[in-house]
Image (cartoon, helix red, strand yellow):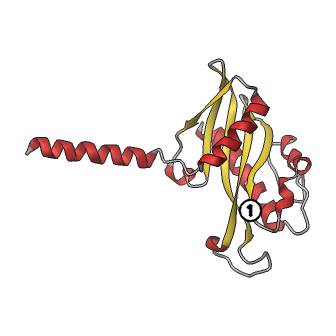
Amino acid sequence: MKKRYSSIALLLLVATSSVATYSYLPDYLTKKMSRQLTKIFGKEMKYQEVAIGDSLAINHQIFEVKTNDTLSGYSMITRALGCQTGGCDKPNKDTISFEEFFFLTAFDKQKNIKKVRVLEYTSDHGYQIANKGWLKQFERDSTFEVGRNIDGISGATISVKSITKAVNEQIIILRDKH
């Protein structure tokens, strides 16, 4: 009887451990992330996910990036909200009706932004935020606000505000939690 309870306890432990380390990033985005990190940190880089609290892990994943076993920097993948399903003009406040996009922010080891890259943007509206020239704005500062140090984009208002808010969150999470 004790053996049976031990087996059940072990099974529950394994099941909850795998849930706690669940990664929402699909495989094809992991490959895109790896290509971007190789461009930024070099071919010798390796990355490893860093555990963060469950409430943060819903939208963010943090990775330590190392080159030859030495810390080179960090990477964060964030899921953000883009245009609403059915068009940006459709009035709705719930997050279910918004389309999502994924972006990567690479930080140096001092936690300053090196690059921001959109990994996937599937909405028909707001895709202009994936423009590398526009994303360079995030490489100049450490706190961002649309209209102050981030340019707005006509037709991409929701996406611009969303990525700006998310980059600010990334900075806080990385500096406070890691």
Q: Is residue 148 left or right of residue 24?
A: right
Q: Name the foreground residue: 113 vs 177.
A: 113
Residue on which disc 1 sits? 122
User: SS for tag 1?
Assistant: loop
Q: Name the foreground residue: 74 vs 43.
A: 43
Quarter holding residue 65: top right
Q: How many marks?
A: 1
Residue 163 vertical position relative to residue 92 in the rendered view, above or below = above
Q: Name the foreground residue: 124 vs 6.
A: 124
Residue drawn 90% across the image and 51% down it:
134
Residue drawn 73% across the image and 78% down it:
86
Q: Identify the residue at the far bottom of this view.
A: 91
Where is residue 66 drawn, in percent x and y? 65, 25
Query: Where does the N terminus fall, quadrant-wise?
Result: top left
Quarter holding residue 70: top right
Q: Is residue 127 left or right of residue 58?
A: right
Q: Identify the residue at the far left of this view.
A: 1
Q: Name the foreground residue: 118 vs 109.
A: 118
Where is residue 27 drawn, in percent x and y? 60, 46
Where is residue 115 drawn, in percent x and y? 80, 40
Q: Amino acid at mark 1?
A: Thr
